[in-house]
């Protein structure tokens, strides 16, 4: 209720990117106070042992994680995890620092509980983020790293660009994600084509193995706008190359069926749409992937996650983990705690003893 009031009276009146920076800065300042971070973990972390899960060789306190895009530069992954997320994915990071696209570049479609972004992978570069992640030392949060292509790197040199990031970040990532599905870097989605994706994923896998003494799990993140045939092709390639999983899905370039007035949607302009309108298509892609790969790959569901019931539906459809981003913007800082609390109740009411018993029961 308090956050809803704050959002209505203050945050929605601010530029969306400015509101993000103010909120995130406040969280970082709060977490920097001695004793506050462990207190937050005690208050907000998932507590039900039945929610604990082991995925990608990682022990997680709950299945809901924060998707890439919120903490692009790995400035406060542990503070974000302390809000109650089971894991945090930072990035998207690129081999070279870049400012991203011109502002304004982040817009709310409040009637649809959605966001349009054309941020353009604004970040300080993989080397700077690797330094921050190395300085974490002993923090318990599971942190994944999401990498993309530097905008100025020609498409023909994309593999080398990704490999540079992989080598820099291999030693500080609990898992690794290759992002070829953002609509905000020209030509990036072309890399989802199997003939271009194969050498890219092969190169990143080799770089991770060379740079780290342990095997870092590798996943690829795909767009909801792929045709069914292309979804199948990426799934088959992931199996062929021995990838660990697929994240489904990134934002969409579609604008169909929105409640927001057309003029407001048009004013927001180009970019990726996230939030509630993505729910149905992301679920369709997830189900198609599960039918194609079975339990041979870890599937991570993202897109339109707002409630514990959404998480439950994705688990039953075959996801081992679920991520949110826009749900946090509209739900507030207690949102991940509420999701895990309500999911625990749903689990108990259904007679299951653990999450593993729920996955792919549809």
Image (tube, rainbow, N blue to C red):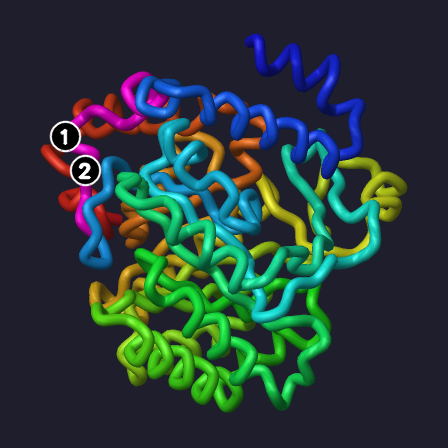
Residue numbers of the magenta segment: 40-54
CA gap between label 1 and label 2 equals 5 Å
Q: In the rendered image of this protein, does residue 354 appear above or below residue 219?
A: above
Residue at figure coordinates x 53%, y 63% from the top left:
126
Q: Is residue 43 magenta?
A: yes
Which picture quadrant has residue 43? top left
What's the residue at 86%, 48% (across, down)?
A: 266
Query: Which residue is depicted at the point 41% across and 85% down?
Result: 203
Q: Residues within 10 Å of mark 2 (few under 14, many from 20)?
A: some
Q: Position of residue 220 (x, y in %)?
A: 43, 68
Measuring from the top left, give residue 110's x and y in whole percent. 71, 30
Residue 175 x %, y %: 33, 60
Q: Which mark is residue 49?
A: 1
Q: Is residue 307 magenta?
A: no
Q: In this figure, which residue is indicated by the disc labeled 2?
A: 52
Q: Which element carries disc 1, helix, strand or loop?
A: helix
């Amino acid at each position: 209720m308090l956050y809803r009031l704050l959002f209505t009276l203050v945050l929605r009146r601010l530029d969306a990117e400015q509101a993000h920076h103010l909120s995130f800065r406040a969280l970082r300042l709060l977490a920097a106070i001695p004793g506050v971070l462990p207190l937050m973990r005690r208050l907000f972390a998932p507590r039900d042992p039945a929610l604990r899960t082991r995925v990608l060789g990682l022990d997680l306190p709950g299945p809901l994680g924060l998707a890439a895009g919120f903490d692009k530069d790995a400035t406060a992954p542990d503070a974000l995890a302390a809000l109650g997320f089971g894991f945090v994915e930072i990035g998207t990071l690129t081999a070279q620092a870049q400012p991203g696209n011109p502002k304004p570049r982040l817009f709310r479609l409040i009637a649809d509980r959605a966001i349009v972004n054309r941020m353009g992978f604004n970040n300080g570069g993989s080397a700077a983020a690797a330094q921050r992640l190395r300085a974490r030392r002993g923090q318990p949060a599971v942190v994944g790293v999401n990498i993309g292509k530097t905008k100025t790197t020609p498409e023909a040199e994309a593999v080398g660009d990704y490999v540079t990031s992989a080598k820099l970040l291999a030693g500080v990532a609990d898992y690794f994600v290759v992002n070829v599905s953002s609509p905000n870097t020209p030509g990036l989605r072309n890399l989802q084509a199997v003939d271009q994706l194969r050498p890219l994923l092969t190169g990143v896998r080799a770089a991770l193995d060379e740079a780290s003494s342990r095997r870092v799990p590798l996943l690829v993140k795909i767009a909801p706008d792929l045709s069914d045939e292309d979804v199948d092709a990426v799934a088959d390639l992931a199996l062929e190359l021995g990838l660990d999983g697929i994240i489904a899905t990134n934002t969409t370039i579609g604008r169909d069926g929105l409640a927001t007035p057309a003029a407001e949607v048009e004013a927001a302009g180009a970019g990726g749409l996230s939030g509630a309108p993505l729910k149905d298509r992301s679920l369709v892609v997830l189900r198609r992937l599960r039918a194609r790969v079975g339990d041979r790959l870890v599937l991570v569901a993202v897109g339109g996650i707002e409630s514990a019931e959404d998480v439950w539906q994705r688990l039953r459809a075959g996801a081992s983990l679920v991520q949110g981003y826009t749900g946090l913007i509209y739900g507030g800082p207690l949102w991940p705690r509420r999701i895990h609390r309500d999911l625990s109740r749903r689990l108990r009411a259904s007679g299951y003893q653990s999450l593993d018993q729920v996955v792919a029961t549809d």
